[in-house]
Image (tube, rainbow, N blue to C red):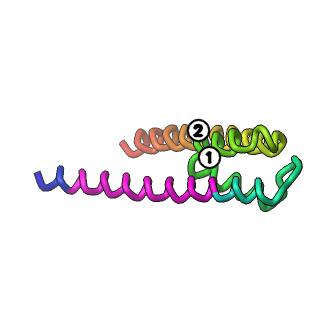
Amino acid sequence: MLVLSLLSYIITGRAIIHSIIELAVLSYVLFFTNKIESNYKSDGTLTGSEKVSVIITELFNPIIAQAFYYYCWKTRFPKRAGQANKYGWLTFGFELLLGAAIVVFGSILVKLSL
């Protein structure tokens, strides 16, 4: 019983930490979209530092961050929205491939250790 309660504590603790990270990322996404909207009057491409901000936030949560960027910017800044959307899909694909590689290599290592 002690093992189950420790396991549930670990899982709950990880879920809380994950939720805090997600809230921080989404708060930054909203701050960043408002910053772009207040600093620019016309559409253009993302600058280097803006690309870095978009990609880093999409590494933590590619689908939700991508949706926020795209739907907040699609009417006023369609080029920026398209770029953020493209980076979101690339990040999602990268994370999917990375997860698949970890599973494949992990199963190979388990088979080799037996």
Closer to the chain start, of discs 1 and 2, is 1
* Near-viewer residue (109 or 18): 18
Residue under label 2: 96
The residue positioned farthest toward the left in the image shown: 1
The answer to which image quadrant residue 14 occupies is bottom left
Q: How many marks?
A: 2
Crowdedness near tag 1: few (<14), some (14–19) or many (≥20) residues, C-alpha within 10 Å:
many
Q: Does the magenta stretch include residue 10?
A: yes
The reply, left or right, for residue 24 in relation to residue 73 is: left
Image quadrant where one finds the C terminus: top left
**Tag 1: amino acid:** Ala
* Residue 81 x %, y %: 76, 42
- 102 versus 32 height, above or below: above
Q: Residue 57 carries which label?
A: none
Amino acid type, callout 2: Leu
- Whether residue 88 is visible, yes or no, is yes
Indicate the secondary structure of the residue bearing disc 2: helix
Seen from the viewer's position, the closer of residues 4 and 21 is 21
What residue range appears in magenta?
6-30
Would you call the spot at circle 2 few (<14 residues within 10 Å), some (14-19), or many (20 or more)?
few
Query: Tags 1 and 2 in contact by the CB under 8 Å rule?
Result: no
Going 80% across and 45% down the picture, which residue do you hit?
Answer: 80
Mark closer to the observer (1, 2)? 1
Q: Where is residue 13 in the image (x, y as percent from the top left)?
A: 33, 58
Type of secondary structure dominating the magenta stretch: helix
Disc 1, SS? helix
User: Does 55 sit above or below residue 49?
Assistant: above
Residue appearing at x 62%, y 51% in the figure: 59
- The percent coordinates of residue 111 (x first, y second) are 41, 39
Would you identify the image quadrant in which residue 48 lies?
Answer: bottom right
Residue at the spot of label 1: 65
Q: Is residue 26 above or below residue 70?
A: below
